[in-house]
Image (cartoon, rainbow, N blue to C red):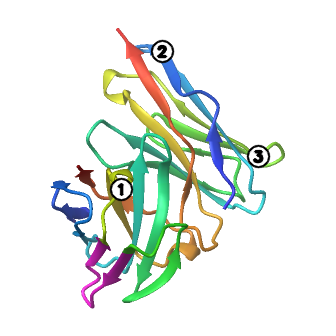
Amino acid sequence: KAGVTQTPRYLIKTRGQQVTLSCSPISGHRSVSWYQQTPGQGLQFLFEYFSETQRNKGNFPGRFSGRQFSNSRSEMNVSTLELGDSALYLCASSPVAASYQETQYFGPGTRLLVL
Amino acid sequence: GESVGLHLPTLSVQEGDNSIINCAYSNSASDYFIWYKQESGKGPQFIIDIRSNMDKRQGQRVTVLLNKTVKHLSLQIAATQPGDSAVYFCAENGGGADGLTFGKGTHLIIQP
């Protein structure tokens, strides 16, 4: 079974631009969670989508948003990029919603650099 | 949510020795824990998990121990190999609204 895939793998943007990242979960998984990883803050939870609905959201500004499609693929969008948004963005999939405490499997991440 | 922490940012061990990576958590309501391994340029890879109704779980060359009394989690890697070199994270899922809460990671360095 194929793992979690994320596109693109690398991205360079400038301040003020917006960006859309894509995540395809493991086949059959309905939950997709997004995390931001930086050297200073570590891994931080952004939000979770399950059955096309956002279930939970971490402590990030409204510039960070996402959506999930009927095939469980998910996108996250960051508008008005800031230098501090430079990070590795990871998505993780799970067969059930995260609140059911099952394992989450991570993709390789998208490395975003904001100049 | 409450944080999950690791005691050491770096751990250096000799190839062939056993490694023990520790993690302290503070949310007493947490009842599901996962260890992940992250190699350079890759996403976290699931290693092993444990639920709060257990105090020990074994996998292939890895063992996770959970001490709920002192809120401590550890990962033991037997006969450490060069391929074990990575950053190891413990993560907690309290079943709430915060997704997984991660510790800051321990970088395991294998010396030949």
Indicate the amino acid at tag 1.
Answer: Asp
Secondary structure found at label 3: loop
Q: Please determine whether, in this image, residue A81 is positioned above or below residue A54.
A: above
Name which residue type carries label 2: Val
Q: Position of residue A107 (x, y in %)?
A: 29, 58
- Where residue B14 appears, as percent x and y from the top left, is 44, 11
Q: Residues within 10 Å of mark 1 (few under 14, many from 20)?
A: some
Looking at the picture, do discs 1 and 2 lie on one chain?
no
Q: Are marks 1 and 3 on the same chain?
A: no
Residue span colored magenta = A65-77
For label 2, the crowd category at 10 Å Cα-Cα, with few meaning under 14, some 14 to 19 and many 20 or more, is some
Specify whether A63 is left or right of A25: right
Residue with the mark numbered 1: A85
Q: Is residue B4 visible?
A: yes
Task: Judge whether residue B69 is colored magenta.
Answer: no
Q: Which residue is mark 3?
A: B71
* Horizontal relation, residue B24 to residue A90: left or right: right
Q: Residue B98 versus residue B16: which sits nearer the camera?
A: B98
Mark 2 and mark 3: Cα distance apart in space: 25 Å
What residue is rendered at 34% in x and 8% in y? Answer: B112
Q: What residue did someone put label 2 on?
A: B13
Q: CA distance from mark 1 to mark 3?
A: 33 Å
Q: What is the quadrant of the N terminus of chain B in the image?
A: bottom right
Q: Chain of mark 3?
A: B
Question: Could you tell me residue A19's position as x and y percent?
Answer: 23, 68
Q: Is residue A10 visible?
A: no
Residue B110 vs residue A62, the one in the foreground: A62
